[in-house]
Amino acid sequence: MSATWTRKDLLGLRDMSREEIELILKTAASFKEISTRPIKKVPTLRGRTVVNFFFEPSTRTRASFEIAEKRLSADSLNFSSSGSSIEKGETLLDTGKNIEALKVDLLVMRHPASGAPHRLARHIKPGIINAGDGTNEHPTQALLDMLTLKEKKGKIEGLHVAFIGDILHSRVARSNIWGLTKLGAKVTVCGPRTLLPVEIETLGVNVSTDVDEVISEADAITLLRIQLERQQEPFFPSVREYAKTFGITVDRLKKAKKDLLIMHPGPINRGVELADEVANGPHSVILDQVTNGIAVRMAVLYLLSGVIGKEKSKDVDSIAQYSSH
Ligand code: CP
Protein backbone atom coordinates (compact mmCIF):
# COMPACT_ATOMS: atom_id res chain seq x y z
CA MET A 1 0.00 0.00 0.00
CA SER A 2 1.53 3.37 -0.92
CA ALA A 3 0.96 6.35 1.39
CA THR A 4 0.11 9.93 0.60
CA TRP A 5 1.90 12.51 2.70
CA THR A 6 -0.42 14.45 5.04
CA ARG A 7 1.83 15.74 7.84
CA LYS A 8 3.03 19.33 8.20
CA ASP A 9 5.84 18.21 10.56
CA LEU A 10 8.47 15.47 10.65
CA LEU A 11 9.09 14.99 14.35
CA GLY A 12 10.14 11.35 14.61
CA LEU A 13 9.76 7.83 13.27
CA ARG A 14 8.02 6.57 16.41
CA ASP A 15 4.55 7.59 15.23
CA MET A 16 5.17 7.14 11.51
CA SER A 17 3.77 4.24 9.50
CA ARG A 18 5.83 1.82 7.40
CA GLU A 19 4.14 3.27 4.30
CA GLU A 20 5.14 6.84 5.21
CA ILE A 21 8.77 5.79 5.79
CA GLU A 22 8.80 3.94 2.47
CA LEU A 23 7.35 7.00 0.71
CA ILE A 24 10.19 9.18 2.03
CA LEU A 25 12.81 6.60 0.97
CA LYS A 26 11.27 6.27 -2.50
CA THR A 27 11.10 10.06 -2.91
CA ALA A 28 14.71 10.41 -1.69
CA ALA A 29 15.91 7.81 -4.20
CA SER A 30 14.33 9.84 -7.00
CA PHE A 31 16.02 13.05 -5.77
CA LYS A 32 19.53 11.51 -5.76
CA GLU A 33 20.02 12.08 -9.47
CA ILE A 34 19.79 15.89 -9.09
CA SER A 35 23.06 15.94 -7.14
CA THR A 36 24.86 14.24 -10.04
CA ARG A 37 23.93 16.95 -12.57
CA PRO A 38 26.39 19.70 -13.56
CA ILE A 39 23.73 22.25 -12.48
CA LYS A 40 22.49 20.80 -9.20
CA LYS A 41 19.30 22.81 -8.84
CA VAL A 42 15.57 22.42 -9.48
CA PRO A 43 12.84 25.03 -8.93
CA THR A 44 10.64 22.79 -6.71
CA LEU A 45 10.69 25.03 -3.60
CA ARG A 46 11.04 28.39 -5.34
CA GLY A 47 9.30 31.05 -3.26
CA ARG A 48 9.41 28.93 -0.08
CA THR A 49 11.31 30.07 3.00
CA VAL A 50 13.11 27.63 5.30
CA VAL A 51 14.76 28.57 8.59
CA ASN A 52 17.53 26.36 10.00
CA PHE A 53 17.21 26.78 13.73
CA PHE A 54 20.16 25.06 15.49
CA PHE A 55 20.54 25.22 19.28
CA GLU A 56 23.33 22.59 19.32
CA PRO A 57 26.50 22.16 17.24
CA SER A 58 26.19 20.32 13.92
CA THR A 59 28.34 19.76 10.85
CA ARG A 60 26.59 17.11 8.73
CA THR A 61 22.91 17.74 9.45
CA ARG A 62 23.09 21.48 9.10
CA ALA A 63 25.23 21.47 5.94
CA SER A 64 23.07 18.75 4.43
CA PHE A 65 19.80 20.63 5.06
CA GLU A 66 21.32 23.86 3.70
CA ILE A 67 22.48 22.10 0.53
CA ALA A 68 19.10 20.33 0.15
CA GLU A 69 17.29 23.68 0.45
CA LYS A 70 19.57 25.31 -2.12
CA ARG A 71 19.19 22.38 -4.56
CA LEU A 72 15.40 22.83 -4.31
CA SER A 73 15.70 26.65 -4.79
CA ALA A 74 14.20 27.53 -1.39
CA ASP A 75 15.16 30.78 0.34
CA SER A 76 16.93 29.77 3.52
CA LEU A 77 18.08 31.49 6.66
CA ASN A 78 20.40 30.16 9.37
CA PHE A 79 19.72 30.86 12.96
CA SER A 80 21.45 29.69 16.14
CA SER A 81 20.79 30.36 19.81
CA SER A 82 24.13 32.10 20.19
CA GLY A 83 23.77 35.66 18.92
CA SER A 84 19.95 35.52 19.02
CA SER A 85 17.52 37.02 21.56
CA ILE A 86 17.34 33.59 23.25
CA GLU A 87 20.57 34.74 24.96
CA LYS A 88 18.55 37.68 26.37
CA GLY A 89 15.95 35.36 27.88
CA GLU A 90 13.37 35.03 25.07
CA THR A 91 11.45 31.75 25.32
CA LEU A 92 11.50 29.09 22.62
CA LEU A 93 7.80 29.68 22.02
CA ASP A 94 8.23 33.45 21.60
CA THR A 95 11.12 32.91 19.20
CA GLY A 96 8.96 30.41 17.26
CA LYS A 97 6.01 32.83 17.15
CA ASN A 98 8.30 35.53 15.77
CA ILE A 99 9.57 33.17 13.08
CA GLU A 100 5.94 32.37 12.22
CA ALA A 101 5.23 36.11 11.97
CA LEU A 102 8.04 36.32 9.39
CA LYS A 103 5.88 34.02 7.19
CA VAL A 104 8.38 31.20 7.12
CA ASP A 105 7.15 27.91 5.57
CA LEU A 106 9.43 25.35 7.24
CA LEU A 107 11.62 25.27 10.31
CA VAL A 108 14.49 22.78 10.63
CA MET A 109 15.22 22.50 14.32
CA ARG A 110 17.92 20.95 16.50
CA HIS A 111 17.54 21.37 20.25
CA PRO A 112 19.20 19.84 23.36
CA ALA A 113 15.80 19.26 25.04
CA SER A 114 13.90 16.10 24.08
CA GLY A 115 10.43 17.10 22.82
CA ALA A 116 11.28 20.77 22.03
CA PRO A 117 10.27 20.53 18.33
CA HIS A 118 7.08 18.63 19.26
CA ARG A 119 6.09 21.44 21.63
CA LEU A 120 6.76 24.15 19.06
CA ALA A 121 4.88 22.22 16.36
CA ARG A 122 1.71 22.37 18.48
CA HIS A 123 1.86 26.15 18.64
CA ILE A 124 3.07 27.48 15.30
CA LYS A 125 1.95 27.13 11.68
CA PRO A 126 5.25 26.52 9.84
CA GLY A 127 6.11 22.86 9.32
CA ILE A 128 8.80 21.61 11.70
CA ILE A 129 11.53 19.12 10.84
CA ASN A 130 13.27 17.59 13.85
CA ALA A 131 17.04 17.71 13.19
CA GLY A 132 17.75 16.02 16.55
CA ASP A 133 16.05 16.66 19.92
CA GLY A 134 18.04 15.77 23.02
CA THR A 135 18.26 12.01 23.42
CA ASN A 136 14.87 11.43 21.79
CA GLU A 137 14.98 11.22 17.96
CA HIS A 138 16.99 12.19 14.88
CA PRO A 139 14.57 11.07 12.16
CA THR A 140 16.40 12.31 9.06
CA GLN A 141 19.59 10.55 10.22
CA ALA A 142 17.71 7.25 10.55
CA LEU A 143 16.10 7.79 7.13
CA LEU A 144 19.46 8.37 5.46
CA ASP A 145 20.81 5.29 7.24
CA MET A 146 17.88 3.28 5.88
CA LEU A 147 18.35 4.67 2.36
CA THR A 148 22.03 3.61 2.53
CA LEU A 149 21.11 0.11 3.74
CA LYS A 150 18.52 -0.22 0.99
CA GLU A 151 20.98 0.88 -1.69
CA LYS A 152 23.82 -1.35 -0.49
CA LYS A 153 21.80 -4.46 0.43
CA GLY A 154 18.80 -4.10 -1.93
CA LYS A 155 16.35 -4.46 0.98
CA ILE A 156 15.80 -3.73 4.67
CA GLU A 157 13.33 -6.50 5.56
CA GLY A 158 15.23 -9.44 7.10
CA LEU A 159 18.54 -7.61 7.57
CA HIS A 160 20.28 -7.86 10.94
CA VAL A 161 21.36 -4.33 11.93
CA ALA A 162 23.38 -3.73 15.12
CA PHE A 163 24.10 -0.56 17.07
CA ILE A 164 27.21 -0.59 19.26
CA GLY A 165 28.09 2.12 21.78
CA ASP A 166 26.25 4.72 23.82
CA ILE A 167 22.67 3.61 23.20
CA LEU A 168 21.39 5.39 26.32
CA HIS A 169 22.04 8.90 24.98
CA SER A 170 21.55 8.13 21.29
CA ARG A 171 18.68 9.76 19.39
CA VAL A 172 20.15 8.13 16.26
CA ALA A 173 19.70 4.64 17.76
CA ARG A 174 16.15 5.44 18.90
CA SER A 175 14.97 6.71 15.50
CA ASN A 176 16.65 3.78 13.76
CA ILE A 177 15.01 1.30 16.13
CA TRP A 178 11.53 2.71 15.35
CA GLY A 179 12.20 2.81 11.63
CA LEU A 180 14.08 -0.45 11.10
CA THR A 181 11.70 -2.60 13.16
CA LYS A 182 8.73 -1.17 11.22
CA LEU A 183 10.48 -2.12 7.97
CA GLY A 184 11.09 -5.69 9.18
CA ALA A 185 14.79 -5.62 10.13
CA LYS A 186 16.19 -7.47 13.14
CA VAL A 187 17.88 -4.94 15.44
CA THR A 188 20.51 -5.62 18.13
CA VAL A 189 21.86 -3.03 20.54
CA CYS A 190 25.22 -3.62 22.21
CA GLY A 191 27.35 -1.70 24.69
CA PRO A 192 28.30 -1.50 28.34
CA ARG A 193 25.28 -2.37 30.54
CA THR A 194 25.36 1.18 31.95
CA LEU A 195 24.81 2.62 28.45
CA LEU A 196 21.90 0.33 27.54
CA PRO A 197 18.51 1.85 28.50
CA VAL A 198 16.52 -0.20 31.02
CA GLU A 199 13.82 -2.29 29.28
CA ILE A 200 15.05 -1.34 25.78
CA GLU A 201 14.05 -4.88 24.66
CA THR A 202 10.41 -3.73 24.96
CA LEU A 203 11.08 -1.77 21.72
CA GLY A 204 11.51 -5.10 19.92
CA VAL A 205 15.32 -5.25 19.87
CA ASN A 206 17.87 -7.83 21.00
CA VAL A 207 20.29 -6.74 23.70
CA SER A 208 23.92 -7.86 23.94
CA THR A 209 27.15 -6.94 25.70
CA ASP A 210 29.20 -9.36 23.57
CA VAL A 211 30.61 -7.26 20.75
CA ASP A 212 32.40 -10.18 19.03
CA GLU A 213 29.21 -12.21 18.80
CA VAL A 214 27.35 -9.19 17.38
CA ILE A 215 30.09 -8.61 14.78
CA SER A 216 29.91 -12.21 13.60
CA GLU A 217 26.12 -12.13 13.09
CA ALA A 218 25.30 -8.63 11.77
CA ASP A 219 24.72 -7.49 8.19
CA ALA A 220 25.38 -3.87 9.18
CA ILE A 221 26.81 -2.23 12.27
CA THR A 222 26.35 1.40 13.27
CA LEU A 223 28.97 2.60 15.72
CA LEU A 224 27.82 5.27 18.13
CA ARG A 225 30.04 7.87 19.75
CA ILE A 226 30.25 8.02 23.53
CA GLN A 227 28.36 11.26 24.22
CA LEU A 228 30.46 12.60 27.09
CA GLU A 229 28.68 15.98 26.78
CA ARG A 230 25.40 14.36 27.91
CA GLN A 231 26.94 12.35 30.78
CA GLN A 232 26.93 13.90 34.24
CA GLU A 233 28.76 10.91 35.79
CA PRO A 234 31.15 8.24 34.45
CA PHE A 235 29.35 5.27 32.83
CA PHE A 236 32.53 3.18 32.38
CA PRO A 237 36.01 3.22 33.96
CA SER A 238 37.95 4.92 31.14
CA VAL A 239 37.79 5.71 27.42
CA ARG A 240 40.83 3.44 26.95
CA GLU A 241 39.03 0.52 28.54
CA TYR A 242 35.89 1.25 26.50
CA ALA A 243 37.94 1.23 23.27
CA LYS A 244 39.55 -2.09 24.23
CA THR A 245 36.24 -3.77 25.07
CA PHE A 246 33.87 -2.30 22.45
CA GLY A 247 36.01 -0.56 19.81
CA ILE A 248 35.91 -2.07 16.30
CA THR A 249 39.33 -2.99 14.96
CA VAL A 250 40.50 -4.76 11.80
CA ASP A 251 41.35 -7.78 13.94
CA ARG A 252 37.81 -7.96 15.33
CA LEU A 253 36.35 -7.75 11.82
CA LYS A 254 37.98 -11.08 10.89
CA LYS A 255 34.89 -12.72 12.36
CA ALA A 256 32.49 -10.54 10.34
CA LYS A 257 30.46 -11.40 7.24
CA LYS A 258 32.38 -10.50 4.04
CA ASP A 259 29.75 -7.95 3.04
CA LEU A 260 29.28 -6.36 6.49
CA LEU A 261 28.51 -2.63 6.31
CA ILE A 262 30.19 -0.33 8.83
CA MET A 263 28.14 2.80 9.45
CA HIS A 264 28.49 5.86 11.69
CA PRO A 265 26.31 8.98 11.96
CA GLY A 266 29.38 11.11 12.81
CA PRO A 267 31.23 12.76 14.35
CA ILE A 268 33.66 9.83 14.74
CA ASN A 269 36.00 9.53 17.71
CA ARG A 270 38.73 7.68 15.85
CA GLY A 271 40.55 5.12 17.97
CA VAL A 272 37.64 4.91 20.43
CA GLU A 273 34.50 3.35 18.86
CA LEU A 274 36.34 2.40 15.68
CA ALA A 275 39.89 2.22 14.41
CA ASP A 276 41.14 4.44 11.56
CA GLU A 277 41.64 1.40 9.31
CA VAL A 278 37.99 0.40 9.80
CA ALA A 279 36.59 3.92 9.31
CA ASN A 280 38.56 4.18 6.03
CA GLY A 281 38.34 0.50 5.08
CA PRO A 282 36.34 -1.52 2.54
CA HIS A 283 33.36 -2.21 4.84
CA SER A 284 32.80 1.48 5.57
CA VAL A 285 29.86 3.31 3.96
CA ILE A 286 30.13 6.31 6.28
CA LEU A 287 30.60 8.90 3.53
CA ASP A 288 27.82 7.31 1.43
CA GLN A 289 25.55 8.02 4.40
CA VAL A 290 26.56 11.70 4.27
CA THR A 291 25.82 11.87 0.52
CA ASN A 292 22.42 10.21 1.04
CA GLY A 293 21.57 12.80 3.69
CA ILE A 294 21.05 15.43 0.99
CA ALA A 295 18.51 13.34 -0.96
CA VAL A 296 16.62 12.37 2.21
CA ARG A 297 16.41 16.00 3.34
CA MET A 298 15.32 17.12 -0.14
CA ALA A 299 12.55 14.49 0.00
CA VAL A 300 11.38 15.59 3.46
CA LEU A 301 11.39 19.29 2.51
CA TYR A 302 9.48 18.47 -0.68
CA LEU A 303 6.82 16.29 0.99
CA LEU A 304 6.19 18.70 3.87
CA SER A 305 6.04 21.74 1.61
CA GLY A 306 3.28 19.98 -0.38
CA VAL A 307 1.11 19.91 2.76
CA ILE A 308 1.96 23.51 3.71
CA GLY A 309 1.18 24.39 0.07
CA LYS A 310 -2.32 22.91 0.32
CA GLU A 311 -3.06 24.90 3.48
CA LYS A 312 -1.78 28.00 1.67
CA SER A 313 -3.91 27.45 -1.43
CA LYS A 314 -7.01 27.03 0.78
CA ASP A 315 -6.18 30.42 2.33
CA VAL A 316 -5.82 31.93 -1.13
CA ASP A 317 -9.18 30.42 -2.21
CA SER A 318 -10.93 31.83 0.83
CA ILE A 319 -9.38 35.27 0.27
CA ALA A 320 -10.62 35.15 -3.34
CA GLN A 321 -14.09 34.18 -2.06
CA TYR A 322 -14.22 37.13 0.36
CA SER A 323 -12.96 39.62 -2.22
CA SER A 324 -15.67 38.59 -4.71
CA HIS A 325 -18.46 39.64 -2.28
N1 CP B 1 24.88 12.88 12.32
C1 CP B 1 24.80 14.10 12.89
O1 CP B 1 23.76 14.51 13.43
O2 CP B 1 25.94 14.86 12.75
P1 CP B 1 26.03 16.40 13.15
O3 CP B 1 25.91 16.50 14.64
O4 CP B 1 27.36 16.88 12.62
O5 CP B 1 24.88 17.11 12.48
Image: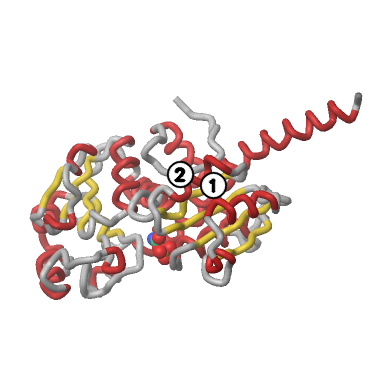
299 in relation to 245, above or below: above
Q: Which residue extends farthest front?
A: 89
Quarter of the image with the N terminus in it: top left
Residue count near mark 2 (Cα–Cα under 10 Å), binned few <14, some 14–19, many ≥20 = many
Judge left or right: residue 277 versus residue 147. Answer: left
Quarter of the image with the C terminus in it: top right
Judge left or right: residue 133 versus residue 269. Answer: right
Q: Nearer the viewer, residue 295 or 300?
A: 300
How far is the residue under mark 1 from the one under mark 2? 7 Å
Taking the spot 72% from the left edge, 31% from the top edge, the residue there is 314
Q: Position of residue 92 (x, y in %)?
A: 52, 55
Answer with the quarter of the image where residue 90 lies.
Answer: bottom right
Judge left or right: residue 243 versus residue 101. Answer: left
Q: Is residue 145 visible?
A: yes
Disc 1 residue type? Ile
Q: Quadrant of ligand 1?
A: bottom left
Q: Please tell me which of labels 1 and 2 falls first in the chain.
A: 2
Is label 2 within 8 A of ligand 1 (CB to nearest ligand atom)?
no
Taking the spot 65% from the left edge, 48% from the top edge, the residue there is 105
Is label 1 within 8 A of ligand 1 (CB to nearest ligand atom)?
no
Contact? badges 1 and 2 (CB < 8 Å): yes
Residue count near mark 1 (Cα–Cα under 10 Å), binned few <14, some 14–19, many ≥20 = many
Q: Nearer the viewer, residue 83 or 87?
A: 87
Q: Position of residue 19 (x, y in %)?
A: 43, 31
Q: Which residue extends farthest right?
A: 325
Q: Position of residue 213 (x, y in %)?
A: 9, 53
Q: Which mark is residue 234?
A: none
Disc 2 residue type? Leu
Judge left or right: residue 310 versus residue 277. Answer: right
Circle 1: element type? strand
The residue indicated by pointer 1 is 128
The residue indicated by pointer 2 is 11
